[in-house]
Image: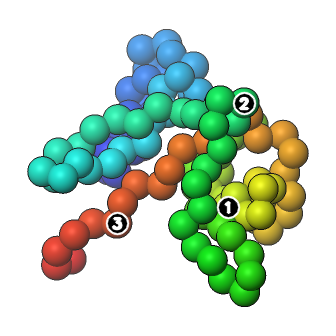
């Protein structure tokens, strides 16, 4: 089972809300897994990682408080499934891709 989903399920089993239980997993420089908290859009917006066709963008996890989805923040607008979504309240970076051989 993917550890990301394990954290969600474990949190729900001990009575935490889905929003509180959700954490993004990243690896630090030594390869250790660490938890990353949700970032409120009122406190900070995502930094752009890509510049394609004159547009600035970054792929992120985001939530409106009800559902978690992968989407993008492009030119100052949150998008889910390619459609602008003004209801996003929190976001977090996607985990780094695995290193080494599969």
Number of on-image labels: 3
Q: Earlier in the sequence, mark 2 or mark 1?
A: 2
The residue lying at 41 percent from left, 36 percent from top is: 36
For this view, does 38 lie left or right of residue 6? right
| Residue closest to the eye, 6 or 23 | 23
Q: Is residue 82 above or below residue 17?
A: below
Q: Which residue is mark 2?
A: 42
* Contact flag, marks 1 and 3 (Cβ < 8 Å): no
Mark 3 vs mark 2: give the one in front: 2
Q: Earlier in the sequence, mark 1 or mark 3?
A: 1
Mark 2 vs mark 1: give the one in front: 2
> Which of the 4 image quarters holds residue 59?
bottom right
Could you say where residue 89 lies in the image, as x and y percent from the top left?
73, 34
Colour scheme in the image?
A: rainbow
Q: Which residue is mark 3?
A: 97
Mark 3 closeness class: few <14, some 14–19, many ≥20 residues within 10 Å: few
Q: Which residue is mark 1?
A: 72
Could you say where residue 95 lies in the image, as x and y percent from the top left?
40, 55
């Amino acid at each position: 089972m993917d550890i990301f989903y394990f954290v969600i399920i474990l949190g729900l089993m001990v009575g935490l809300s889905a929003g509180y239980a959700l954490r993004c997993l990243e690896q630090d420089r030594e390869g250790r897994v660490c938890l990353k908290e949700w970032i409120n859009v009122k406190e900070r917006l995502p930094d752009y990682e890509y510049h394609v066709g004159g547009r600035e963008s970054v792929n992120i996890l985001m939530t409106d408080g009800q559902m978690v989805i992968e989407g993008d923040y492009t030119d100052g607008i949150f998008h889910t499934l390619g459609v602008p979504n003004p209801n996003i309240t929190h976001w977090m970076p996607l985990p780094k891709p695995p290193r080494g051989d599969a």
